[in-house]
Image: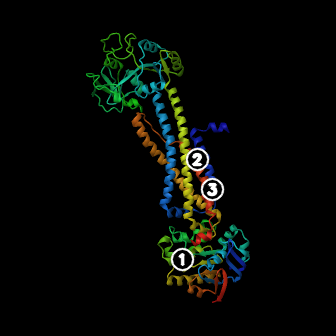
Amino acid sequence: MSLSLSARDLTVRSGARVLLSLERLDLPAGSLTGIRGASGAGKSTALHAMAGLLAASGSLIWGETDLARLSQPARTRFRGQHMGMIFQDFLLFEEMTARENALVSAAFRPDRAALAARADALMQRLGIAALADRRAELLSGGERQRVAVARALAHDPAILLADEPTASLDRAAADALIADLAALARDEGRTVVIVSHDAHVWAAMDRVLTLDDGHLCGDSHG
Amino acid sequence: MAELWNGLSADMQDALTLLAILAPGLVLGAVICRGLRLWPLLSSLLRRYPWTNLGYVALVALSVGLGVGLIAQERGLRQASARVAAKFDLILAAPGDEIAMLMATVYLQPTGAPLLDGVTWDQVSRSAGAALVAPIAYGDSWQGHPLVGSTAEFVAHLSGDLAEGRMFAENWQAVIGARVPLEIGAHLSPAHGADEAAEHDAHEGIEFQITGRMAPTGSPWDDAIITPVESVWLTHGLGNGHEDAGSDRIGAPFDPRHFPGTPAILIATPDLAAAYGLQAQFSSDRTMAFFPGAVLARLHGLMGNLREVMSVLSLGTQILVAASVMAGLIVLSRLFARRLALLQALGAPARMIFALVWAHAALLLGAGAVLGLGVGLVAVRGLSAVLSARSGLLIEPHLGWPELHVVAAYFTLALLVALVPAALALTRPVTQELRR
């Protein structure tokens, strides 16, 4: 299942300060969108708002669900069902094996067998199946980020949100990861939003949005 | 219900009590962790900061061990002192301090005391209710070991069959306690008095030969040297207690007119009624008859009050430790905050974060409590060895149901307190932790 995003007057505040203000944003289901901008432009805030991690006013409709109107537990539930997230510094449990990391959400999901089967298949596809029993702390940066991708997609989410996924990788590893992410997204029709400073990432996207001071100031199609 | 409960064995009652104490924590754990698969994450949290986690476990173990050790030690001491006193049904002495006479007669802690005369001895030894009447004449020593004059019947009453050798059969022979470092056939020359006040040359020329060794009694009598009471009297130039001053005979009956005196007389009775009868008969302005068990019970009552005070202090200490452990857990959960934020970003419900932090605390507290039982056992054994060496009492402490109940109560209380850091973990902003 793919989900589109429709945001109207989406505003995130910290006290009186406006961190993000998106008057109108539509992302088609199955599209790949990049977000760029200078440091402090609101890229991560936008991503966190799309994930429902931040309370926002206005509307933020994924498919038919308006996250802005949901309580925090309901947003968490939605995120758990429909979203996968990837972070710049991987955020793996260093003491756990690659497979345990990929399956970390089995701690709170009921469909553990399906999750395990899917995580194994993803690790195979991402070329890290042989590293399944190796502790995360012993993996290279590229391998770690692939484990993080397997973790993000193990529950087969419709949406993938990534925050600077290539920032901690060397060029070769970054390019390989971008190719894999794009292929995984397109093959299964996921809606992908990636915050990145990396021009190689932008090149792989359908569309790249530019943020400045929390406002959308550029929208280029690939 | 009460009948059903009373019909259960003591062990079953204790086991059920233990379960009842643990039940709130177990139910809480089952409710909090229901449907979650926490072990891989818990294992990761434990491995992430192993020394910090071990430090908390050690802190809890030390706290629990001290509390448990205190209770077990007090009970071991109480049981040991009661076991020794059980051999001494009724003690007769000159009017004075019962506790001082108890300590002198039963626990061989010497004290100056007026002597009971021959008339009293005669009355007691003729009493129908007395199964055994024996003089206990103390005051001399050998290298710190008390030398006590009494009778062969008293030795048999105290330790049963000898472990080695034979009973003394004449004056200047002696039977030694299990811990006296002498061989059968060895000779010793006693000092007058004991400890620092001992006069080593006062009984020059007096010598005893060891003929036998008593079986261990687990009492200060294991350090004693027992001789015929006549030898003690003769050593002090008081005669032999018999009509014929030149006689070599030992043991009762003694002649009241020639009876030199004894600071205490042990009376063993076949039943409680006889003991009470004799106590009433010999409680007068000339004699004091007391039950060592009753005096000991009063002392234990005093110790009981002391135990209550110490228990309150121990509880206070444990509360302080629990508070510091909780504070530590809050700090620890802050160390894990980014991981918790990650789990929330991945869609983990608040209940799961709460359960993870609580279960982590429960694991540390549980490990500390179990380890604390071991720490308590080791501590109490060490302390008992020191106390046994000093007092001569064989203190055999062990951990029993009371200790398990105390540890279970502590654990349950700690599990309830651990709800606090678990709840606090939910209040941290996820996005800030993710950006950190």
- Position in image of residue A62 (x %, y %): 70, 77
Tell me the element at label 1: helix
The residue closer to the viewer here, A214 or B250, is A214
Q: Which of the chains bears the disc numbered 2? A: B
Numbered disc in front, either 2 or 3: 2
| Disc on res. A145 | 1
| Disc on res. B427 | none
Separation of disc 2 and disc 3 at Cα? 18 Å
- Reply above or below: A11 against B13: below
Circles 2 and 3 in contact, beta carbons < 8 Å: no
Which residue occupies 31% across, 30% down?
B143
Tell me the element at label 3: helix
Which residue occupies 54% across, 32% down?
B301
- Reply above or below: B137 against B310: above
- Position in image of residue B202 (x %, y %): 29, 22
Tell me the element at label 2: helix
- Reply above or below: A42 against B93: below
Which residue occupies 59% across, 63% down?
B37
The residue closer to the viewer here, A26 or A81, is A26
Q: Which of the chains bears the disc numbered 1? A: A
- Given the image, on which type of amino acid does mark 2 rest? Ala
Separation of disc 1 and disc 3 at Cα? 35 Å
Question: In this rendering, would B137 be left or right of B66?
Answer: left
| Disc on res. B30 | 3
Q: Earlier in the sequence, mark 2 or mark 3?
A: 3
- Position in image of residue B363 (x %, y %): 55, 56
The residue closer to the viewer here, B309 or B176, is B309
Residue B426 visible from this viewpoint: yes
Numbered disc in front, either 1 or 3: 1
- Reply above or below: B240 against B66: above
Return the residue at label 2.
B409
- Position in image of residue B231 (x %, y %): 32, 19
